[in-house]
């Protein structure tokens, strides 16, 4: 009965009640949203790189190395000579290594030069292995495997030919290595990790692409018609290629450098084969568009980083120390979990601040409710007297008001949870597209339930303030409120 | 002092003195008796302690001296929760105006006493609450108004709904505090007739308070509060 009275009383003041509920709901949304984002981000990051014990790259910031090499955020710290990598991969403590050559892109997606070992050793979430939606792993220099999002967005599938651009932010058609198109041989299943937004080729493929680019550029300059393929794979025919990448149809000329004349891809006789006979040409200034850095032009046989799996935790620490102290080549080895921990500690201050803002918003929301309930009391004195006259004890008046504030808070919490989850469901795609972080929509965790419980309790406590005043005035007024 | 006839008295007040806090006495009544089943008119112009007396009789204000027996229970010795329960079960109350909870329908307003108090509900016996409401509504000629929100009703209609609520489940004592003062003469007469009828039907004792002495003729007994209340007389003298 009291519940019904409280409910109808609130409905009798729809605007105030709705605004109060909205204020509470929005503050709950903020508080839960911060928490959800925090948890989602941590789970997303931590879940991306399981099973890898060390990430090794050129000497530099640990966070930059990890973010650049694994999460596709920013660029890696520098390059590690391939010889150094090979040397270290024979270290007895090492169970496996996976090289990563990052520096090229295709339509805004990263192209990663690696080995088939990546697909074998990479683990994500709860030790999930990478699985293929189509096709197989990369083997030859022309092979390419696509992350699920790349395949879905660009409409590529096994058999599609793909050209790769210089630099990480290359515009399609501008500086494409059109001379060495890759053929998609496999598409990965969705992992909700940065792998979904990457294209994978072999190190040979990367090398071939760059060497050909150089030879190709040189041939353009020298206008040498004799640089025809000798043996091995047939030359890709750019003009005859299937969409969506049609180098022959590209309207923009490929800019190779200030000293080289524009080359019309469609007009080229044919692509040049990667030759073991053809020496790599060092011409970084010639090939890279201004502002983009391409490690392969400087050092053809270089990696951005490599992933390491060790046998034991102890060996991981030993190895990390060894690599960090390695004199001939300055390198940095990071344990992903530790470095992420550093990231969380750095972000902790920000999170704490956001949480404080959330808590303060809750306080503001509840004060709003207090004001609404309190200011309604004056006009409700008559109502209280009537309730008293029909037999309501003063405690009933208290209960009624506490019930009203409790109901408002409860509705606010329910709406807030719905808003948070709905908001993340809607924003998920946008967040992922912009930051590469996949935030799973989750039911509130225990911490969030504690928050909600505290807010509900606070809502009820807030109701005690007007209830106390109503109690006092109903005692003083009796049956005849002084209006 | 012997209390002749106190056993069948609905209200029996002896030596009641009441003041708010440390202030002067507002009420000082040597004796006031209302017989069960009587329809009593209590004349009380404003400022004579009328509101205070009704508050005490309804058990909302605590009397601490003398004796206030209502339906053979002494309110002076009861705790406030007991008085609240007592009022809920045995007393119907009609205010001068604004009797209704604005966000409830006429029907739900009438139902309130029974819904808030199980013992008042139990008075209905085998009759269902719905039947009882429709019954009392038909006595007061408001059957067609039951579904309406109380804010949509005219003042006269509101007073009849309030009377129906006070009479629901036939309480022994019905107290009306100036219930007709906001009504025009025609409506007032109609209301009084319906009230008298319904009170008789419910077999209740009626204590009707008004500043309008002219209404007194319609009642069995007429009392004058200024005469009964010594505190009011001294206040006037001073």
Image (cartoon, coloured by chain):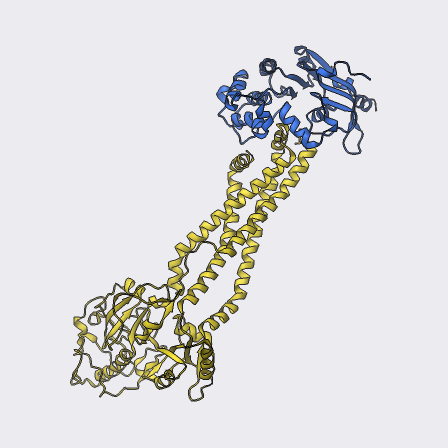
Question: Is residue B95 among what the camera can see?
Answer: no
The x, y position of residue B54, in whole percent, is 70, 24
Q: Residue at x 44, y 86 (%)?
A: A326
Q: Residue at x 47, y 50 (%)?
A: A417
Question: Is residue A157 among what the camera can see?
Answer: yes
The answer to whether A113 is drawn above or below residue B214 in the figure is below
The x, y position of residue B69, in whole percent, is 73, 22
The x, y position of residue A419, in whole percent, is 45, 51
Q: Which chain is yellow?
A: A
Colour in which chain B is drawn: blue
Q: Work out which quarter of the rendered image holds the C terminus of chain A and state it.
A: top right
Q: Quadrant of residue A121?
A: bottom left
Q: Nearer the viewer, residue A405 or A333?
A: A333
The answer to whether A30 is drawn above or below residue B29 in the figure is below
Q: Quadrant of residue A265?
A: bottom left
Q: From this viewpoint, which residue is outermost toward the front?
A: A312
Q: Quadrant of residue A395?
A: top right
Q: Residue at x 44, y 63 (%)?
A: A43
Please indicate whether residue A475 sits to the left or right of residue B135 in the image: right
Please indicate whether residue A216 sits to the left or right of residue A354 in the image: left
């Amino acid at each position: 009965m009291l519940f019904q009275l409280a409910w109808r009383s609130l409905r009798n003041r729809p605007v105030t009640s709705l605004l109060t509920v909205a204020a509470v709901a929005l503050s709950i949304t903020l508080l839960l949203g911060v928490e959800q984002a925090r948890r989602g981000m941590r789970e997303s990051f931590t879940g991306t790189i399981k099973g890898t014990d060390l990430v090794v790259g050129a000497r530099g910031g640990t966070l930059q190395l990890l973010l650049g090499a694994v999460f596709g955020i920013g660029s890696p710290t520098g390059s590690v000579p391939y010889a150094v990598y090979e040397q270290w991969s024979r270290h007895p403590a090492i169970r496996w290594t996976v090289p990563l050559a990052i520096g090229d892109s295709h339509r805004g997606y990263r192209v990663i030069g690696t080995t088939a070992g990546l697909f074998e050793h990479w683990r994500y979430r709860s030790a999930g292995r990478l699985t293929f939606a189509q096709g197989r792993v990369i083997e030859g220099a022309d092979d390419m495997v696509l992350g699920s999002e790349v395949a879905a967005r660009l409409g590529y599938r096994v058999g599609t030919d793909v050209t790769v651009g210089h630099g990480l932010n290359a515009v399609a058609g501008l500086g494409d290595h059109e001379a060495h198109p890759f053929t998609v041989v496999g598409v990965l299943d969705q992992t909700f990790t940065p792998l979904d937004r990457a294209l994978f080729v072999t190190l040979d493929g990367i090398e071939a692409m760059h060497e050909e680019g150089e030879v190709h550029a040189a041939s353009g300059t020298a206008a040498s018609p004799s640089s025809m393929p000798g043996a091995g794979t047939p030359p890709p025919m750019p003009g005859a290629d299937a969409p969506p990448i049609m180098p022959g149809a590209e309207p923009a000329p490929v800019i190779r450098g200030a000293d080289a004349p524009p080359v019309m891809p469609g007009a080229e006789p044919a692509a040049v084969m990667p030759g073991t006979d053809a020496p790599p040409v060092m011409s970084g200034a010639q090939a890279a568009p201004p502002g983009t850095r391409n490690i392969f032009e400087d050092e053809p046989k270089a990696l951005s980083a490599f992933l390491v799996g060790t046998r034991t935790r102890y060996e991981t620490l030993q190895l990390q120390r060894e690599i960090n102290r390695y004199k001939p080549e300055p390198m940095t080895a990071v344990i992903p979990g530790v470095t992420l921990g550093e990231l969380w500690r750095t972000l902790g201050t920000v999170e704490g601040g956001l949480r404080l803002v959330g808590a303060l918003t809750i306080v503001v929301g509840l004060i709003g409710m207090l004001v609404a309930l309190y200011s309604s009391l004056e006009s409700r004195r008559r109502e209280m007297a009537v309730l008293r006259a029909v037999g309501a004890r003063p405690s009933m008046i208290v209960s009624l008001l506490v019930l009203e504030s409790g109901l408002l808070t409860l509705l606010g919490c329910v709406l807030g949870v719905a808003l948070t989850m709905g908001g993340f469901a809607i924003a998920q795609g946008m967040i992922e597209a912009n930051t590469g972080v996949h935030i799973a929509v989750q039911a509130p965790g225990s911490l969030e339930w504690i928050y909600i419980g505290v807010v509900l309790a606070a809502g009820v406590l807030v109701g005690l303030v007007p209830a106390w005043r109503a109690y006092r005035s109903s005692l003083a007024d009796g049956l005849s409120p002084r209006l | 002092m012997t209390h002749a006839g106190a056993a069948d008295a609905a209200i029996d007040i002896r030596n009641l003195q009441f003041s708010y806090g440390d202030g002067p006495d507002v009420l000082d009544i040597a004796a006031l008796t209302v017989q069960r089943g009587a329809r009593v008119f209590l004349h009380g112009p404003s400022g004579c302690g009328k509101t205070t007396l009704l508050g005490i009789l309804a058990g909302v204000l605590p009397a601490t001296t003398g004796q206030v027996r209502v339906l053979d229970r002494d309110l002076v010795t009861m705790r406030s929760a007991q008085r609240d329960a007592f009022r809920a079960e045995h007393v119907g109350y009609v205010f001068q105006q604004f009797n209704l909870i604005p966000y409830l329908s006429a029907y739900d307003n009438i139902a309130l006493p029974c819904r808030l108090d199980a013992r008042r509900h139990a008075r209905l016996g085998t009759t269902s609450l719905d039947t009882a409401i429709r019954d009392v509504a038909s006595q007061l000629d408001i059957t067609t108004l039951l579904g309406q929100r109380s804010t949509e009703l005219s003042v006269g209609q509101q007073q009849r709904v309030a009377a129906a609520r006070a009479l629901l489940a036939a309480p022994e004592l019905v107290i009306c505090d100036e219930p007709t003062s906001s009504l025009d003469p025609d409506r007032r007469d109609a209301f009084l007739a319906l009230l008298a009828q319904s009170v008789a039907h419910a077999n209740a004792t009626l204590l009707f308070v008004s500043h309008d002495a002219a209404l007194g003729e319609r009642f069995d007994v007429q009392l004058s509060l200024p005469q009964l209340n010594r505190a009011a007389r001294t206040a006037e003298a001073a």
